[in-house]
Amino acid sequence: MRVRLDVAYDGTDFSGWAAQPGRRTVAGVLLDALTTVTEPTGLTVAGRTDAGVHAAGQVAHVDVPDAAWAALGPTLVRRLAGLLPGDVRVRAATAVPDTFDARFSATFRRYEYRVTDAPYGADPVRRRDTLAWPRPLDRAALDAAAAGLVGEHDYAAYCRRKENGTTVREVTRLDWRRDLDGVLVATVQADAFCQQMVRSLVGAMLAAGDGRRPPDWPARQLTLRERSSEVTVAPAHGLSLVAVGYPADPAAYAARAEVTRNLRAPR
Amino acid sequence: MRVRLDVAYDGTDFSGWAAQPGRRTVAGVLLDALTTVTEPTGLTVAGRTDAGVHAAGQVAHVDVPDAAWAALGPTLVRRLAGLLPGDVRVRAATAVPDTFDARFSATFRRYEYRVTDAPYGADPVRRRDTLAWPRPLDRAALDAAAAGLVGEHDYAAYCRRKENGTTVREVTRLDWRRDLDGVLVATVQADAFCQQMVRSLVGAMLAAGDGRRPPDWPARQLTLRERSSEVTVAPAHGLSLVAVGYPADPAAYAARAEVTRNLRAPR
């Protein structure tokens, strides 16, 4: 039985998602808890978040024996709540068709980046997921920078390294809002991202936002065919994976997975 | 020169507000930072929060030499941001009349208590200021319990101990809302509170909210003339001091202080 897991975590004390020997990772902690109650195989995630990055809407899938699911299904979320540490939560566990693949069936990933330019810094209870920026940020400059980065482009300048696959991505949404508490929040959505891409886009927009670069500077980096040495990667702790999208019709899971497998290796 | 300080903190790693030898307290950390830049005297706070309780809108006052204020005033917030640890922030520092007393001039204190009844527990990035309640909470029962506790009453049942003063208080606001993320938030406002009063009120309302007590049970405790042994004090980490009110007209600071000094020792 394939089970979809909707997962949230505070990335502060994790060396990212992916299991690594000797490191505390989200996948490692989650597998430990799952192993206590069943025999999980093939834990697969939509977005392999880096060390320090948070998630409110991460999605993974795992296979468990049919009998275990029949016994566990209705109580799995509560049982995992008792087994997991407070910095990881499984918000939902749902039986899905075998064709559902958390990584390859996904149609989009949506991230948010929180940054405050308040002179006093970040609100203490949100300091783990909010970047304190030491200079005032101009909303119009941030908006102009964002407008120049949205669309389908080769984001080589914003990718950690050009791996085997393409660095062409379609950023379907990139905008800023200012919340009631004054925090600026960037929303970035794409079919998929290459490594450190969101943090690199945010880093470039912040340089425009505080006036060190002109507002069209981030877009001009898109002409580069390799990583830009002038783009600063924004710190991990402001970033959260907030949502992953899938086809509304489960019959489309397999076809979507086929498309993305052929296109590139999405993250 | 008297200076009003608007202060926010994450109470997790503090033994409360009040300076105590050998303990890490908010007042202690704040005085250390202030002493680095000036000679502060008479740090006085509106709400002496207990260990583990947070604040978004705490107010304090402190006296500093006139010359120091003239030199420091415009940059004090930024300087303190660099000197203070991330779990305390001074959001504003404002010159006020000598008649302003953060404790005695206050007209109200407003607290919020965050609790979730989601089966998976508290959102990881908010787990430090959100109580995870293991049973479903009925909003109608919470509302009925709150309605029975608002007003001017002798809250002896909800006070840690009847000290020298009266335990009569006027609770001007007590209501629940459910935020977009599903978290239940109680707002409690009064002229002043006795020790552990907000957490005791919340503890009684939660007992009604999850059905262990009838909705009118919290109000029935108000007939007691001493601490109720049946009321459970809700954990500190769900509680935040969100606002302190003062007379709109600074000319009224002294008169208000005179009234409250004569009435009781407010917290």
Image: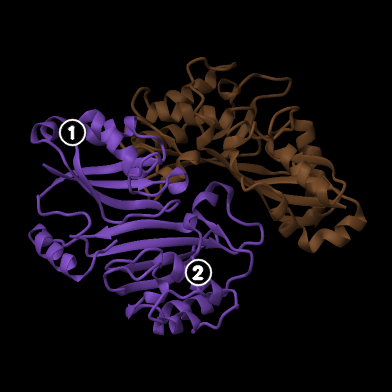
Chain colours: A purple, B brown
| Quadrant position of residue B75 | bottom right
Q: Are marks 1 and 2 on the same chain?
A: yes
Amino acid type at circle 1 is Glu
Residue at the (37%, 22%) spot, across then down: B213
User: Can the viewer see residue A46 in this picture?
Assistant: yes
* Residue at the disc numbered 2: A203
* Residue at the disc numbered 1: A39
* Residue B92 against residue A211 in the figure, above or below: above
Q: Is residue A38 left or right of residue B245?
A: left
Residue at the (34%, 72%) spot, across then down: A173
Q: Which quarter of the rendered picture does the C terminus of chain A lie within? A: bottom left
Q: Residue A72, image x and y in percent?
A: 17, 31
Q: Residue A59, image x and y in percent?
A: 26, 51
Chain that bears disc 1? A
Marker count (numbered): 2
B56 or B35: which is nearer to us?
B35
Q: Is residue B215 left or right of residue A132?
A: left
Chain that bears disc 2? A
